[in-house]
Structure formats: structure tokens, C-alpha cells
Image: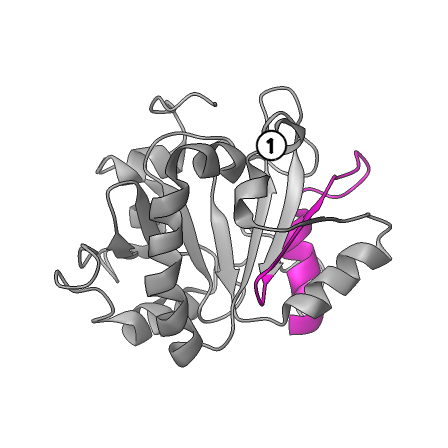
């Protein structure tokens, strides 16, 4: 099990903890005042700070993990409950989602700077994303259930996770892959020119604001103890 302490200097942890000096507030200047969409005891759902398309969301654990392999170990039932609530709303609003993750580990940092675990939800066909990854020479391991992400094979190493249509696949990365690799892969079906998928280059504030407008009212206190942002 990975450390669940607050990660000093990690912006996700600071934002979840309610700190005022965070990147989101500096970039968006209070419009909107928050990107939080819903929350449970152990998870927070937010809009991506630099979305690649409308509907680009993140699921984060409240506690500090480097990958969802550790999250699944500790919170699998709650995660399933959140997905059962979230996915139908997402599908109706944005279309079928693909879940993506670059899982990190303390001693393995290939192609990303992951300091706090997060899942991307994006309304792009999972098969197209998976085909692009395979075309880059990566080899998948298929998981029979999400619970199989809780394995020493994944909890102690970096990985790329792709989930759609109840299929879960994990790809070990290579050292020669570019940083923000999954964002670069998603950019291909979206026809985003290289390197405009880099979250530091183009923020696409209109996508986040459109996303927040479309998810307004998703969460109510009556639904699975999901709290409105």
C-alpha cells in the first residue's frame, strides 16, 4: 500500500485540502470559482485544468497515492459506487467515456510527472486510443476485473491504464516515450497538432467552462452521498 499522507508541494493535494494558492485559481482567476464536480468520502471529481476536449474530467483520491493500484486496494467498493453513479451521467452528457491513467511509482518515472494519482475520463473511443498505444509497440495485459489492478505487478511499477466498455488493459511503459504520453496519444483522434496537447502550452479555458456548465446539477445530496461542489 502506498503512502496516503498529504504530499507537500503537489497541487492536487493542495487543491483537495482547500488551499487558496493553487494553480487552478491562478489560471482561471475565479471564472469559474471551482472545478469541483462531485465528491465522496474518498474521491473528488473535477474538470481537467487543461482539457483536451469538452468533458475531460479527472477522478482523484482524497488521500495521497501515486497510482490507482493502491487506491483499488483500499477503496474498491467505493470506487465502484462512484463509477456506477458517474458513468451514466457522463455517457448521457458527453458520450461513452474512456478512462486513462499513467500510474507512477516512487522509483520509476517514465514519460510523466505524476505526484498524485488521477484517472482521466474523456469522451474518445477507447479502441482508437488503444490502437495508437499498440502501434507504438506497447504490449497490453488484460485485466479480468478492475480488482486485478491491485497487484504487485502494477502497484510497484509505472503503467498506462486504459478502460472502456468494461475492458481494462494495462501497458508497461518504455523509457523512450515522451512525457505526457497519454495526452499525446489522445491528441491523435482529436487531431490536435503536436505539441499543442501539452498542458503547459495551451489551456483551452473555454473547454473547462463549457464542461462545468454541462455538469451543473449532476450531484445532489440525495444521490449516493455525492456532495455538490
Lateral position of residue 221 relative to residue 111, left or right: left
* Residue 75 % position (x, y): 38, 38
Q: Is residue 15 visible?
A: yes
* Residue 18 % position (x, y): 21, 38
Lateral position of residue 190 relative to residue 67, left or right: right
Where residue 114 sits, quadrant-wise, is top right
* In front of the other: 18 or 117: 117
Where residue 89 sits, quadrant-wise, is bottom left
Q: Residue at x 67, y 30 (%)?
A: 153
Count of numbered marks: 1
Q: Is residue 176 magenta?
A: yes
* Residue that protrudes farthest toward the front in the picture: 144
* Residue 55 % position (x, y): 44, 69
Q: Which residue is mark 1?
A: 151
Q: Residue at x 67, y 25 (%)?
A: 108
Q: Residue at x 66, y 64 (%)?
A: 187
In the rendered view, would you say 207 is above or below 42?
below
Q: Residue at x 77, y 61 (%)?
A: 132
Colour scheme: one colour
Question: Which portion, as a residue range, is magenta?
Answer: 164-191
In the rendered view, would you say 175 is above or below 106?
below
Q: Is residue 48 visible?
A: no
Amino acid at each position: 500500500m502506498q503512502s496516503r499522507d498529504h504530499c507537500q508541494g503537489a497541487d492536487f493535494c493542495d487543491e483537495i485540502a482547500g488551499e487558496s494558492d493553487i494553480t487552478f485559481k491562478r489560471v482561471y482567476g475565479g471564472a469559474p470559482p471551482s472545478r469541483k464536480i462531485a465528491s465522496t468520502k474518498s474521491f473528488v471529481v473535477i474538470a481537467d485544468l487543461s482539457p483536451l476536449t469538452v468533458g475531460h474530467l479527472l477522478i482523484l483520491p482524497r488521500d495521497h497515492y501515486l497510482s490507482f493500484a493502491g487506491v483499488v486496494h483500499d477503496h474498491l467498493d467505493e470506487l465502484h459506487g462512484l463509477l456506477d453513479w458517474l458513468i451514466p451521467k457522463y455517457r448521457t452528457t458527453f458520450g461513452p467515456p474512456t478512462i486513462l491513467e499513467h500510474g507512477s511509482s516512487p522509483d520509476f518515472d517514465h514519460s510523466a510527472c505524476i505526484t498524485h494519482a488521477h484517472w482521466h475520463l474523456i469522451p474518445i473511443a477507447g479502441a482508437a486510443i488503444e490502437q495508437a498505444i499498440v502501434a507504438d509497440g506497447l504490449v497490453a495485459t488484460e485485466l479480468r476485473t478492475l480488482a486485478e489492478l491491485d497487484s504487485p505487478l502494477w502497484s510497484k511499477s509505472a503503467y498506462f491504464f486504459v478502460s472502456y466498455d468494461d475492458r481494462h488493459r494495462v501497458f508497461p511503459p518504455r523509457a523512450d516515450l515522451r512525457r505526457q504520453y497519454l495526452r499525446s496519444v489522445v491528441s491523435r483522434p482529436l487531431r490536435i497538432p503536436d505539441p499543442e496537447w501539452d498542458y503547459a502550452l495551451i489551456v483551452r479555458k473555454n473547454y473547462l467552462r463549457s464542461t462545468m456548465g454541462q455538469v451543473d446539477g449532476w450531484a445532489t445530496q440525495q444521490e449516493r452521498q455525492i456532495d455538490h461542489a
